[in-house]
Amino acid sequence: MIAGYAVLLSFLFLLIILNICIGSVSIPLKEVAGALFGGSSDSTVYHIVRDIRIPRLSAAAILGGALAVSGLLLQTFFHNPIAGPYVLGVSSAAKLFVALTLIFSLRFGMITDSWGMILAAFLGSMVSMLFILFVASRVRSMSILIICGVMIGYICSAVTDIAVTFADDSNIVNLHSWSLGSFSGISRENDLVAAIVVAFSLAFAFLLSKPMNAYLIGEIYASNLGVNIKRFRVFLVLLSGLLSSCVTAFAGPVSFVGIAVPHLMRNVFKTEKPVVMIPACFFGGALFCLLSDLIARSLFAPAELSISTVTSVLGAPVVIWILFSRAAGRER
């Protein structure tokens, strides 16, 4: 277990350095050190490192980790490794509510702050989750549930695209790149708000580690240990919704991270224990999104890919692997 964390943190440190040095403008490590510790006289390098790349990589690490933990909580809730905020339509619903909030607030001359965007995204994610829970109470097939989630995602994405297309305010132009998923343009103030929300959610998730461990064995077993199943499930939904809405509010929808990373971490650490998996998923999600963001902004620099394009290419094969592994397991 310690070796697994050591490997994750080593790769995470390496990707942090690469994300600072590599981009449309390559910056040698020596100049990066000068900008960070006050020895650089180049104001351009200082601005790029301190005001653009560090806030961006911080957002990728914090929000990527949050998205992976959100996926872990949903997979625990549904007892299925395919469950995730993007697949179940939670991210798309959150995106729709944020987009509508920004459009209407700008139309009436108001400014929506970071907390307002998180609140709008959280409301959207809760509406989506309520529909998913309603479907789950009526059908037992996980495949039908996943299909319903995908349909919610398509509907919400379509409505968001329509709203963005016909928005007449010039400030909405930036909404288009956000709606595709991007860590660009995130400020240090946004990072601070995201860090507060994610830290609170992770601390609460750790408090639920023992009930989660019992719940993974079975609801009857957890009930016998004194776990209030209804309240526990409400907490899982709220925490997952809060984490995924924080990601959507600042970076837009980011696909496959919530499914792929928990599965990869289970294979690395060979355990389902939440006390191990929660930090592992956070670090794994941070690593996954830092790598994806590095590829997104450097592969065709100065042109930039949306973050979901890269996470889809990296994460979709993992999902296919999960499906084949489950099918093979049933045949044995």
Image (cartoon, rainbow, N blue to C red):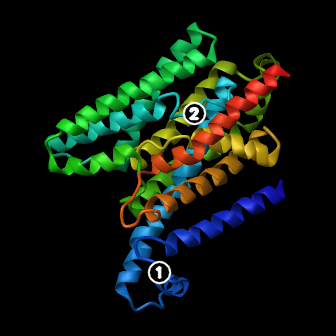
In the displayed structure, 54 sits above or below 100; it is below
In the displayed structure, 266 sits above or below 47; it is above
Q: Image quadrant of residue 157?
A: top left
For marks 1 and 2, the one nearer the N-term is 1
Q: Which of 49 and 109 is in front in this view?
A: 49
Mark 1, Cα crowd under 10 Å, few <14 / some 14-19 / many 20+, is: some
Q: Which of 322 and 226 is in front in this view?
A: 322
Instruction: Where is residue 274? Give x, y as percent.
Output: 74, 40
Q: Residue 84 got which mark?
A: 2
Residue at which label 1 appears: 27
Q: Distance between the residues labelled 1 and 2?
A: 37 Å
Q: Say which residue appears at 38% left-offset and 89% top-offset.
A: 42
In this rendering, does residue 200 appear at all?
no
Is disc 1 in contact with disc 2, using a CB cutoff of under 8 Å? no
Q: Residue type at mark 2?
A: Gly
Q: Image quadrant of residue 83?
A: top right
Local SS, label 2: loop
Instruction: Where is residue 292? Give x, y as percent.
Output: 53, 55
Local SS, label 1: loop
Q: How many labels does the image show?
A: 2
In this rendering, does residue 43 appear at all?
yes
Q: Which of 102 and 265 is in front in this view?
A: 265
Q: Say which residue appears at 30% left-offset and 34% top-offset.
A: 160
Quadrant where the C terminus is found in the figure: top right
Q: Residue type at mark 1?
A: Ile
Left or right of 206, for residue 305: left
Mark 2, Cα crowd under 10 Å, few <14 / some 14-19 / many 20+, is: many
